[in-house]
Image (spheres, helix red, strand yellow):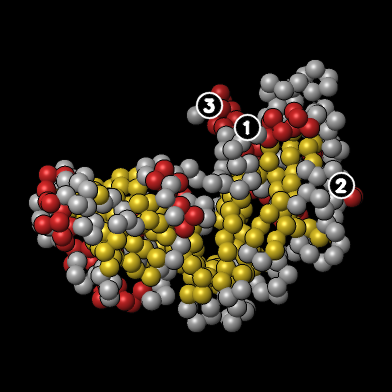
């Protein structure tokens, strides 16, 4: 091997060493250390978070292919957090279990994946004396700054349950969990990087800024409270030299303009689009017909009215002769009441799922998810469209009283067959995208 070749190999090794070194530093040293909301000698008291142990990883061929548990090996009686992954789904499900493995909360959508970029911590956040969890999920990104793009997910005890709140921004480290008022309560300083392109500061130039907001915790809620400390939210000009002073480059209107470029700068709200799922016939459940399941979020913004009507007046001889069609809506309960209309008000409406078979528009099903029940509507168009009638089944939801479903759907075995796949469709595709 010649001298020139050896020099090239040496140069490659040195370059790789520098890259690896910078990546290792990037894992623990955020890029905004010289532009934090406070100078190092003026930093508020830090609240210590305990990093949870990875207790167990389980693999299965069932619905969840991978489950990862977090807790404390030296505290066997404490609750533990479980993240469950399924292929084809971007995020993981989150459960809280007691020390015996009983689920006490969940499933929740976690906005994190069961990956190595995950950190799970325990700390008491909301003042109720119970164990809370914080999940740090590094998303990564292009450039040194956006290497620290991160979802910070708060899992807060809320009575006998837990509430999950994701935030999006940049990871600045554990020192950003602070007792900023000196009252023993933990608050979180949220970090966001703002590109100021197109907005000129007082010096006539555009600049970039680090923006910090204070998040507070109460019960299961996470909310912004910038009134706790003066000069929050803090906009720190990203200068070449270390700088921790709130900028005077921007007016309040300019800050609002730059902040407004993000639809949800702190709390992400996934935008739900129409989702359609087609399940080819397996020759058994729905012979010869493709099952089509469709969800359109726009339908949840208005009152749901059962699709039943008659184009003829009640006094028409055709109607009076066929008297059983006068009750266009049949509520299939103990009384089998006949109604002129059936409405679920939009205030209680969560989602409407359409279910039909191939190109068949003569009959279909609607599964209407309300706050306190699932309404199953079977619709049929009769007599060349003169009549459209409905059978309506009301199922208690969530699980309280759900064991009654067999009796309620006894008269419609197809609806009973559909119920399970529709529930999975709702939990996997719809529930993560609705803000209630």
In three-dimensional space, the C-alpha distance between marks 3 and 1, rounded to whole angstroms, equals 51 Å
- Residue 34: give x, y in percent of width and height: 80, 40
Q: Secondary structure at mark 1?
A: loop
Q: Residue tagged by mark 1?
A: 261
Marks 3, 1: nearer the viewer: 1
Comes first in the chain, label 3 or label 2: 3
In this rendered view, identify the residue nearer to me: 421 or 374.
Answer: 374
- The residue located at (70%, 48%) in the rendering is 190
Residue 275: quadrant of the picture: top left
Q: Residue tagged by mark 2?
A: 230
* Residue 258 in sight in this render: yes
- The residue located at (59%, 38%) in the rendering is 263
* Residue 40 in sight in this render: no
Q: How many marks?
A: 3
Name the mark on residue 5: 3
Residue 15: quadrant of the picture: top right
- The residue located at (59%, 57%) in the rendering is 165
Comes first in the chain, label 1 or label 2: 2
> Is residue 55 positioned above or below 253 on the image?
below
Comes first in the chain, label 3 or label 1: 3
- Residue 184: give x, y in percent of width and height: 82, 66
> Is residue 109 positioned above or below 18 on the image?
below
């Amino acid at each position: 091997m010649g001298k020139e070749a050896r020099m090239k190999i040496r140069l490659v090794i040195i370059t790789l060493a520098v890259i690896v070194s910078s990546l290792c530093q990037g894992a623990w040293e955020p890029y905004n250390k010289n532009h934090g909301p406070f100078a190092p000698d003026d930093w508020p008291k830090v609240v210590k978070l305990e990093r949870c142990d990875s207790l167990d990883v389980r693999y299965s061929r069932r619905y969840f292919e991978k489950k990862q548990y977090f807790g404390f090996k030296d505290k066997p009686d404490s609750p533990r957090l479980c993240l469950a992954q399924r292929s084809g789904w971007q995020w993981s499900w989150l459960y809280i279990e007691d020390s015996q493995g009983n689920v006490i909360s969940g499933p929740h959508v976690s906005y994190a994946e069961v990956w190595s970029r995950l950190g799970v911590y325990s700390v008491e956040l909301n003042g109720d004396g119970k164990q809370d969890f914080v999940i740090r999920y590094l998303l990564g990104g292009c450039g040194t700054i956006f290497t620290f793009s991160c979802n910070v997910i708060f899992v807060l005890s809320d009575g006998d349950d837990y509430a999950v709140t994701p935030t999006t921004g940049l990871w600045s480290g554990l020192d950003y969990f602070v007792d900023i008022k000196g009252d023993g309560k933990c608050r979180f300083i949220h970090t966001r990087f703002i590109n100021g392109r197109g907005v000129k500061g007082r010096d006539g130039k555009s600049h970039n800024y680090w923006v910090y907001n204070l998040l507070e915790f109460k019960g299961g809620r996470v909310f912004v409270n910038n009134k706790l400390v003066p000069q929050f939210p803090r906009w720190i000009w990203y200068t070449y030299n270390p700088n921790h002073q709130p900028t005077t480059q921007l007016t309040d209107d300019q800050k609002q303009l730059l902040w407004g470029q993000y639809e949800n700068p702190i709390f992400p709200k996934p935008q739900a689009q129409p989702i359609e799922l087609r399940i080819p016939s397996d020759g058994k459940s729905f012979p010869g017909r493709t099952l089509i399941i469709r969800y359109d979020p726009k339908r949840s913004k208005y009152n749901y009215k059962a699709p039943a009507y008659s184009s003829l007046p009640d006094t028409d001889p055709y109607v009076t002769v066929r008297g059983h069609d006068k009750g266009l809506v049949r509520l299939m309960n103990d009384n089998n009441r006949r109604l002129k209309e059936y409405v679920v008000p939009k205030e209680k409406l969560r989602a409407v799922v359409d279910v039909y078979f191939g190109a068949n528009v003569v009959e279909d099903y609607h599964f209407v998810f309300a706050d306190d029940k699932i309404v199953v509507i079977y619709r049929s168009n009769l007599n060349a469209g003169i009549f459209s009638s409905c059978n309506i089944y009301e199922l208690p939801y969530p699980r309280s009283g759900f064991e009654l479903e067999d009796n309620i759907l006894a008269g419609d075995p197809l609806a009973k067959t559909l119920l399970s796949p529709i529930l999975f469709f709702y939990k996997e595709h719809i529930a993560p995208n609705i803000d209630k």
